[in-house]
Amino acid sequence: MNAEHPDVVISGHFGGAYGVRGWVRVMSYTDPARQLLDYRPWLAEFDGSWREVEVREARTHQKGLVAWIEGVDDRNAAERLKGILIGVAAGSLPATGADEYYWRDLMGLKVRNQDGERLGRVHHMIATGANDVMAIRRAGGEETLIPFVAQFVLSVSLDEGVIEVDWETERVPGDD
């Protein structure tokens, strides 16, 4: 999620031009990558402001995605999109099931172990292929990595803003 625009979930960015007719490569942050094709409308961040872009056509291509955006009719125009973030409205994402969470929902949550010791807050998440990993940051900047699996994550309370884990670590006073 974008801190400046909490209703926009950053979901990818435009890559380089694809061909000469205005198509552009799309680097998706969704899992699976093709899922970005299901979300509409797409929003693009131009100079710090989010604007809706009309996707004329989009599809998978080899191991990625390509799209043709309204008003982008040649290779030069497509190249100007390179690096521009793609977002979707948070409300357009499907609801999560029981014990399912979007990473954006976990960011900033307090992490405590079962003894009530504060371990820090979720700073970011890491996809490893085998499982996701929470990067927990303490007030002093020290980071602890905890696998986001049932063996270690005992409970997640979005309402209370707390994740309880089975994890032993040295307590640092003042961490929240």
Image (tube, grey):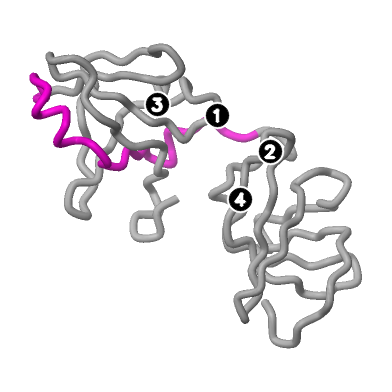
Give the mark toward the camera: 1 or 2: 1
**Mark earlier in primary sequence (1, 2):** 1
The image's mark for residue 125 is 4
Q: Position of residue 122 (x, y in %)?
A: 63, 61
Q: Position of residue 84 (x, y in %)?
A: 25, 41
Residue appearing at x 38%, y 12% in the figure: 61
Residue appearing at x 62%, y 81% in the figure: 140
User: Circle 2: is it few (<14), some (14-19), or many (20+) Cα within 10 Å?
Assistant: few
- Judge whether 166 appears above or below 170 on screen: above
Residue appearing at x 74%, y 53% in the figure: 156
**What is the spatial separation of the Cα atoms under label 4 and label 1, in whole angstroms?**
14 Å
Q: Position of residue 121 (x, y in %)?
A: 65, 67
Q: Are marks 1 and 2 in contact (CB under 8 Å)?
A: no
Q: Which residue is mark 1?
A: 31
Name which residue type carries label 4: Met
Q: Are marks 2 and 4 in contact (CB under 8 Å)?
A: no
Q: Which residue is mark 3?
A: 39
Residue appearing at x 17%, y 53% in the figure: 47
**What is the spatial separation of the Cα atoms under label 1 and label 2, in whole angstroms?**
14 Å
Q: Secondary structure at mark 2?
A: loop
The quadrant of the image that shows the C terminus is bottom right
